[in-house]
Image: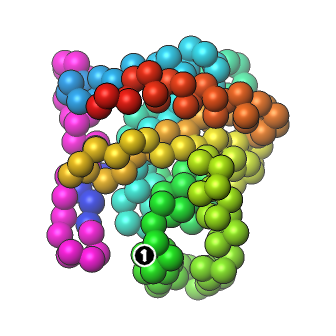
Amino acid sequence: MGYLSYDSYSRQYMLTHRVGLLGSWVQNIHVSFAPILAMMEEVGELCHETIILAEQAGTVVRYIYVVPSRKAMRLHVGPGTVRPVVHSGVGLVFLASYTPERVREILKRVNADRAPNEAIMEYSSIKETMDQIRADGFHLFTNGVNVGAGTISVLLPQARGFPPLAIAIGGLAETIAGDHRELVAVLNRSINKHLSCQ
């Protein structure tokens, strides 16, 4: 369900960010999430697209909070949505933040869990993409799991004691790709405004 994350290096479980959202249907989200949610609402108002908060859980990425777009043609996803870490834009952003050794360990697990008809994932097949993400500070990803859809993803400043979080703007692939520079600028301004002191 995404409330615990397993660290294969220390062999320990720790709480994920999703725990902070428990009971949110009864009362306001925990105060530590307030700046992130305010930032997401602001980005949604500015760009009119779907805004996704995600964290990595082993070999998958889980969407833990979503601000849906109000556009007629939009990306439809909800909290709890799971994507393979190596086949999602936001997943590759997480991988790009790790050392090559850690990425190879994750790929070993991905390959061990793959279906018989799935190709083996090699580090060399994603190295160029990860190098580009590190250079750019964001990742534009189109026509992945949802054909015709695209995302622009960035990592959020990391809170001590918690796994990293990423935020993505999702919408029609053509729109996201065409506007990606402006969308990155909106994300960076809003992150600096809401999270620079957190």
Residue 49, compared with residue 184, is above or below; it is: above
Residue 42: x and y in percent read 50, 17
* Residue type highlighted by circle 1: Arg
Q: Which residues are magenta?
A: 7-28
Quadrant of image for the C terminus = top left
Residue 23, compared with residue 148, is above or below; it is: above
Residue 122, compared with residue 186, is above or below; it is: below
Residue 20 as seen in the image, left or right of residue 46: left
**Residue at the disc numbered 1:** 102
Question: What residue is shown at x 45% (from left), y 66% (from top)?
Answer: 98
Report whether residue 113 is seen: no
Question: What residue is shown at x 82% (from left), y 34% (from top)?
Answer: 178
Residue nearest the observer in this picture, 35 or 157:
157
Residue nearest the observer in this picture, 98 or 63:
98
Residue nearest the observer in this picture, 48 or 185:
185
Question: What residue is shown at x 58% (from left), y 44% (from top)?
Answer: 153
**Quadrant of the rendered structure where residue 182 is?**
top right
